[in-house]
Amino acid sequence: PYFEDDTALESLVAAMNEALTGARDRVGELCEEEGGQSDACRSGEELLTQGEALAALLPQVLGGAPVSPLEDSEAGARLLERMISVHAGLDDLGVSGFPTSLNLPQAGLTDEEFRSGFLAPVYGSNRPPADSWPGLPELGDVELHAAALLVDRELGNDGLGSWYAPLHVRSAASVSVKLPTQQPDTLRDYFESVRPDGLSGVRIRLVNDLVLGQRFGLGLHMEVLESGSGEVRRRLATPDAAFDPEAPRSSVEWTPGTLSSIEATPRVHLTQELAIALRYRFFGRGADRYTWPNDPDDALDPGMLSPSGPIRSHSFGGELSFSTLHGHAEDTPGVPFLVRLRLERDISGSGGRVPAGVRMEGGIRIFPRL
């Protein structure tokens, strides 16, 4: 990093602004003496515009980026050339004090610096990259749930299951209210999470389970998440720019697209408790919308953050589960629990930046009696 703390950068920009303040008074005098349409007045105003733009650019380029341009790089040379040009113009006006040196680094990142700075995890919104996760995890979005059992019926000799074995049909629905208790994604994250964090929302789930006899089952799970809007800090660059430190950072109004998913899980019970299953999952996300919350910047379009529209993906995987719920339904003593291990891979997608990844999930659920 160029600046280890904000003090050095603040001192540099303060010196630039102090010189520009003196130049502003001098240009005002020239315009009054020679007229607002004179060459001297126009040149002075153009010089002020160049100096003010450079003073506003440096904190964006060097203040928040984890790296900075090298001294002999094209970007570093352009920055230094602009500083020298403004300094020379101010010197002709009789104004001194504008800096002419940036002291940019002369050597690039080592492999170890790149690994620790870009490949290590990031914790919190104001912490630099670290080799390990310090402290406890952050609080996520708290959710309030309400669920209801819609159908719990066994079809026997007089029903559909009479051909082979009793068919047990269960269906339940739930509504969740998501509270915005988690910190939104930060500027240090170059890829957004699939689920919008830090925003309120309402989630609706419908869960169906068909059990044929003692061995076979099919789970169907449908879910929709509608999120509210919220003001977030974003780096205004197109998503295909993996690293763009010169992109301006602004507060924008973010309205995530509707999330929807459909899961189908056919399974075979090896024993009453142990089961293996295949799993198919469809995931869809509507196009996100970004707008200016207050005063718009006509030079920038926040819509560039979401150029691809809705996305769709399909994944396939397997699951291993161990559950004691069935035994406890027959008044077996103890606390029922469910342990699940799942491996899943994305097989296709469309509509934009759809991650092609492999996910492994594991979990345990305990059901104490009330």
Image (spheres, rainbow, N blue to C red):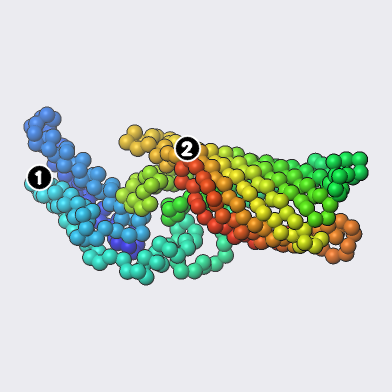
x, y percent for residue 244: 34, 51
As drawn, the residue found furthest toward the front would be: 163
Circle 1 is placed at which residue position?
93
The residue labelled by disc 2 is 309
Q: Which mark is residue 296?
A: none
Q: Position of residue 203 (x, y in %)?
A: 65, 42
Secondary structure of the residue carrying tag 2 is loop
Give, as a three-letter code, the residue at label 2: Gly
Res 335 seen here:
yes
Which quadrant, please, contains the C terminus? Answer: bottom right
**Circle 1 Cα neighbour tier, 10 Å, few/some/many (<14 / 14–19 / ≥20):** some
Q: Residue at x 15, y 48 (%)?
A: 86
Q: Closer to the N terminus: mark 2 or mark 1? A: 1
Badge nearest the viewer, 2 or 1: 2
SS state under label 1: loop
220 with respect to 185 (left or right): right
Front residue of 321 and 95: 321
Q: Residue at x 78, y 43 (%)?
A: 171
Label 2 crowd bin: few (<14), some (14–19), many (20+), radius 10 Å: some
User: Which image quadrant: the N terminus?
Assistant: bottom left
Which residue is pictured at 37% across the width and 45% down the height? 237
